[in-house]
Image: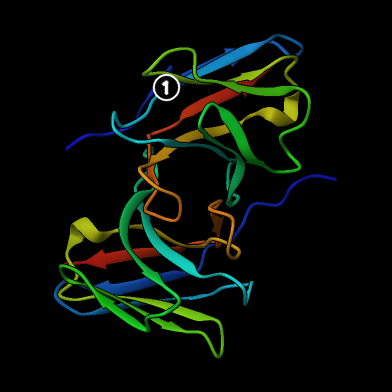
Amino acid sequence: EPEVTQTPSHQVTQMGQEVILRCVPISNHLYFYWYRQILGQKVEFLVSFYNNEISEKSEIFDDQFSVERPDGSNFTLKIRSTKLEDSAMYFCASGDRGNQPQHFGDGTRLSIL
Amino acid sequence: GESVGLHLPTLSVQEGDNSIINCAYSNSASDYFIWYKQESGKGPQFIIDIRSNMDKRQGQRVTVLLNKTVKHLSLQIAATQPGDSAVYFCAENGGWGTDKLIFGTGTRLQVFP
């Protein structure tokens, strides 16, 4: 069964450094998403992406965050200058249409020191 | 201030019994709902979804019920198995024109032999 894959599984970064989280969505999907889950808290929406542009973003997704689909298979989330509070599990998801099941990867655990 | 982790409600059931997991959603404009299962160290796994023009939908061993009057969603799992042990999240889309998912707090299901 096709699945969303995310790399790395764990990323440790010094505060203030840039980090790029990578995702390979399911191949025929057109809608892409990033969510995050701070330890012990709810899963929170960050951003949705369709047709090579952001379609929606949350208040969390400020100027420090950006997303890109650099080629036909990857979808990345960049945090320019990481803060301690960026420590969380980051999940990528994809779907073949809007308001259809979003399929999640197993996440990247981001630890900011 | 310091973030406080969520205390997940826990449902404990015996193997073979039926489980019912409940969820109160927040937005009366939401028209798409979805249940996910999350095992430790993994991403949310799609179980079943339902649109607001339905009040019941069945899958394999699972049934979702939607009561829009009281903004309530439930997930029924028939003949619960040890492999069903996980945290279960409901999510809603927040209304027409958006496909971001708004997650609930989750319920931990523990299945005993």
Q: Position of residue A7 (x, y in %)?
A: 41, 18
Task: Kindly give the residue lying farthest to the front in the view shown.
Answer: A51
Q: Position of residue B15 (x, y in %)?
A: 17, 71
Amino acid on which the number 1 mark rests in the picture:
Ser
Is residue A13 among what the camera can see? no
Task: Kindly give the residue lying farthest to the bottom in the view shown.
Answer: B69
Q: Identify the residue at image location x=36%, y=39%.
A: B42
Q: Nearer the viewer, residue A20 or B49?
A: B49
Q: Position of residue A17 (x, y in %)?
A: 71, 9
Q: Position of residue A54 (x, y in %)?
A: 62, 33
Coloration mode: rainbow
In the rendered image, the vertical position of residue A62 relative to residue B40, given as above or below:
above
Q: Nearer the viewer, residue B101 or A105?
A: B101
Question: Alpha-carbon neighbours of circle 1 within 10 Å: few (<14), some, or many (≥20)?
Answer: some
Q: Quadrant of the C terminus of chain A?
A: top right
Q: Identify the residue at image location x=38%, y=17%.
A: A72
Is residue B37 among what the camera can see? yes
What residue does disc 1 label?
A: A9
